[in-house]
Amino acid sequence: MARITASVFTSHVPAIGAAMDMGKTQEAYWAPLFKGYDFSRQWMKDNKPDVIFLVYNDHATAFSLDCIPTFAIGTAAEFQPADEGWGPRPVPKVVGHPDLASHIAQSVIQQDFDLTIVNKMDVDHGLTVPLSLMCGEKDPKTDAWPCPVIPFAVNVVQYPVPSGQRCFNLGRAIRKAVESYDKDINVHIWGTGGMSHQLQGARAGLINKEWDNQFLDLLIDNPHGLAKMPHIDYVREAGSEGIELVMWLIARGAMSDVDGPAPLPKVAHRFYHVPASNTAVGHLILENQ
């Protein structure tokens, strides 16, 4: 059967992608951040998956206020980088995995989660920045991402947004779906977005280092408890955009220790850095034991 062997958690700050695209990764401001992903890039080479199931949020490119699905799974054969107002990022197209994506959709919907099936969409920095951080710079003309990617978009932009518990339970359903797939493949699940940040209002620029690191601690050791955290705690402690962190609970809910006798996952790598464009950057790699 297919199996989820690891989960990856990372912020997807758009300025990180811009820094990579403009060759600024070695500048004094950016170098400490990118150094924190040196381990991750080697880890990706040593632990290359067959498919990445990548949880992110769209930033008004594929979806608008006209129609915002709570959970949307990309089932297309490929996805182009989105034009977010200054042209698409110069990165390779994303190759999908329609067969596994359709299987997951079937299984998860039968587990009573309502998913929107998306057969055509462009993917923005929420998805391409994590790929760039973990896989390094790629020439769109000659290179490709190391494996197919299934985009999974979550609405954390327009209220009402899903609860942490709902996201955590969805991760559990996704794991069951993957494990019922009849091909022997290795799947990674990534949760992206966050950490603490607020982009507007009187608290614009908010960063809460203590809360962010406590979130990482709980994500590792007590995800069931963390899933119960209400929205207001995210907004109060991590800023209005801190709610993106519920997406990390989807990836954590898909790990093998959540529903069974398996031990806690191994922490392969943990990294935290501020600031990156007035945003806290968190990163974690967990391996199933």
Image: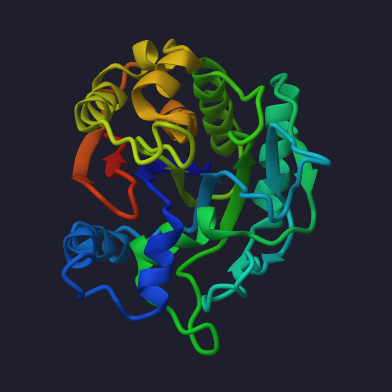
Which residue occupies 35% across, 11% down?
Answer: 225
Determine which quarter of the picture holds residue 32: bottom left
Q: Which of 281 and 218 is in front in this view?
A: 281
Q: In which quarter of the image is the C terminus?
A: top left
Residue 133, by quadrant, is bottom left
Residue that lies at the very extreme toward the right in this rendered image: 66
Q: Position of residue 23 (x, y in %)?
A: 33, 81
**Is 278 on the left or on the right of 66, as rendered?**
left
Residue positioned 80% across, 54% down in the render: 119
Q: Dividing the picture into quarters, in which one does residue 61 lie? A: bottom right
Q: Compared to 248, does 99 lie above or below?
A: below
Q: Where is residue 145 in the image (x, y as percent from the top left)?
A: 48, 71
User: Left of 49 or right of it: where is 76?
Assistant: right
Measuring 29% from the left and 36% from the top, which residue is drawn there? 207
Seen at 19% across and 57% down, the residue is 36
Residue 40: in sight, yes or no? yes
Asked whether, in this view, residue 60 is left or right of residue 120, the answer is left
- Above or below, 183 against 29 in this view is above
Q: Which of the two residues, 35 or 100, is positioned nearer the viewer here?
A: 35
The reply to whether residue 182 is visible in this rendering is no
With respect to residue 262, does 128 lie above or below? below
How many numbered callouts?
Answer: 0
Q: 45 or 271: which is nearer to us?
A: 271
Give coordinates of residue 29: x percent, y percent. Answer: 20, 65
Q: Position of residue 206 (x, y in %)?
A: 33, 35
